[in-house]
Amino acid sequence: MKNFIVITVAGALLMTTAAAQTMNTPAAPVDAPSPQGTAGMDMSRQDSSQTMNPMQEMRGMTMSDSPAQTRQTNASLPAPELLQDVAKRPARKLTEFLRLADDNNPTLKQAAAIVRRSAAQATQAGLYPNPAIGYQGEQIRGGSYGGGEEGVYIAQSIVLGGKLGLRRGIYDQQKKADEAIVAAQVDRVHNDVAQAFYKTLAAQETVIARRRLLKLSQDAVETAHQLANVGQADAPDLLQAEVEDEQAKIDYETAQRDFLADFGMLAALAGEPDLPVSPLEGAFDTPPEIDSDHIVAKILQSSPAAVQAAQEVSVAEAKLKDAKREAIPDLELKAGEQYNFETVSPLPQRAVGPQTFASAGVNIPLWNRNQGNKAAAEIEIERARHEVQRMQLSLRQKAEPLLQAYLSSKFEAERYRTEMIPRAARAYELYLEKYQEMAMAYPQVLVSQRTLFQLQVSYIAALSRAWQNAIALENCTLQGGLDIPATTSSPATTINLPNSGMGGGTE
């Protein structure tokens, strides 16, 4: 209480005798955050006398010009300025990063390659067996008849039962499942890029808030030293003000480095790791609206992961149809022409001459009727159907907490915006008015102003969480923009080999 009275009296004395020479003019009231969207680093919370572009507030942030630096109780270094060059670059929007990711993210190219692979496998599985041509000879040395038979033949397997179409159908269905993989990977990439963008945008807004908090701490140090100059401030007051100033410098540097780290992660997800760090522009104050009553059902119905799981059932059913037909034997045809050197008359000596031969046959499915593969295909259908159920439960498990976290964060941000920050802003204005009337100590003004900006930092964090959860829900909870696309298709390149005996579809 004694210190409070001393500080109040000193403030009145300074205001009436040497205010212009020894004290800074009190700062203008700080506006509460605007409910409208922001443009880059400008959150519409700067002084009304200034018009800032997205990173203008981060330009010229040199701390060494503070008069208090030369009069502090110990050496004090200015807060490092890491974003001065960044502020000079044009601001980037989310659409730019999404376009970069679509063009450069390697996982999207991998997913597209999986689709092309299934299409190529479908082509290979449906190719007809190659014909065979060869030499055939019997009794080549002639024996006692002095003859023998030699010639050429051609053989062809005729695939019966529509097996080639069924084999091709397996990979056609797999191709559709792989197309769902592409859609899922696009959602994963877009989800990660959008979340990283708004996380970086939140870090950018935090830099601005921390910069303003740092300015408040500088003002507190300056005021404490001015009071000390007239003998109205004690050493503990100076030390406390300087400690708060140093903490503000640490927080400011940490905020800048968080922004740089988040931007680097964003650039990596976009496939441009060497992208120069630049300010961001986005409607940070207005997170998207989510239909909380229907969003979970929408995810269960339209998620690419759920579509892929359902398509795997179709793949398993196609394999079962093929397994049932594989027991049907192929028709083996063979025909040729040969010359028979066997003598049929001694005088005049004459050989039998040209002969034609042909054969046709099929394998009899007596022991092997493909019964094991048919049973395995039926089991695979059962497994695929359980996978659909598992995927739906997994999506619901992820979506429900995200939905509740989104609603909670949105409510929290709204309370900060409409209730807490306006009240803190009004309290600051009242304290400032009393100080100007010499009825309040200046440190109390700083406390109220610091409270206002700390609430703004919490408001930024709540908005960031609301964005993260909303983006995850809009992208069906899919994450992993740099994870390898998952597929159940076979990468085998031994399907229906050209030299396979029956032209079968083996892997």
Image (cartoon, rainbow, N blue to C red):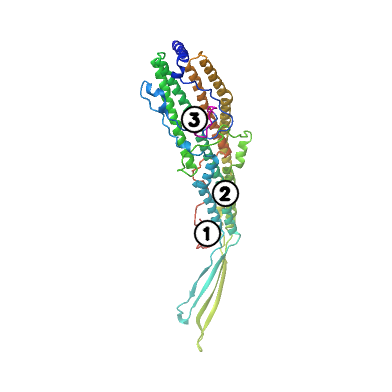
Residue 262 visible from this viewpoint:
no
Residue 51, how many percent across, how many down?
54, 31
- Specify whether residue 73 is painted magenta: no
Residue 261, how many percent across, how many down?
45, 36
| Amino acid residing under circle 3 | Ile
What is the count of numbered marks? 3
Q: CA distance from mark 2 to mark 3?
A: 44 Å
| Amino acid residing under circle 1 | Asn
Looking at the picture, tell me which residue is in the foreground, 469 or 321: 469
The first of marks 1 and 2 along the sequence is 2
The residue at which mark 1 appears reads as 496
Name the residue at 49% across, 42% down: 269
Asked if the residue at tag 3 contacts the one at tag 2, i.e. Cβ–Cβ closer than 8 Å, the answer is no
Q: Circle 3 sits in a helix, a strand or a loop, which is it?
A: helix
Which of label 1 and label 3 is nearer to you? 3
Asked if the residue at tag 2 contacts the one at tag 1, i.e. Cβ–Cβ closer than 8 Å, the answer is no
Which mark, by number, is residue 208? Answer: 3
Which of label 1 and label 2 is nearer to you? 2
Q: Residues within 10 Å of mark 2 (few under 14, many from 20)?
A: many
Which of label 2 and label 3 is nearer to you? 3
Looking at the picture, tell me which residue is in the foreground, 402 or 138: 402
Which mark, by number, is residue 179? Answer: 2
Span highlighted in magenta in the image: 45-57
The first of marks 2 and 3 along the sequence is 2
Q: Would you say the magenta stretch is mainly helix, strand or loop?
A: loop
The first of marks 1 and 3 along the sequence is 3
Residue 309 visible from this viewpoint:
yes
Q: CA distance from mark 1 to mark 3?
A: 64 Å
| Amino acid residing under circle 2 | Glu
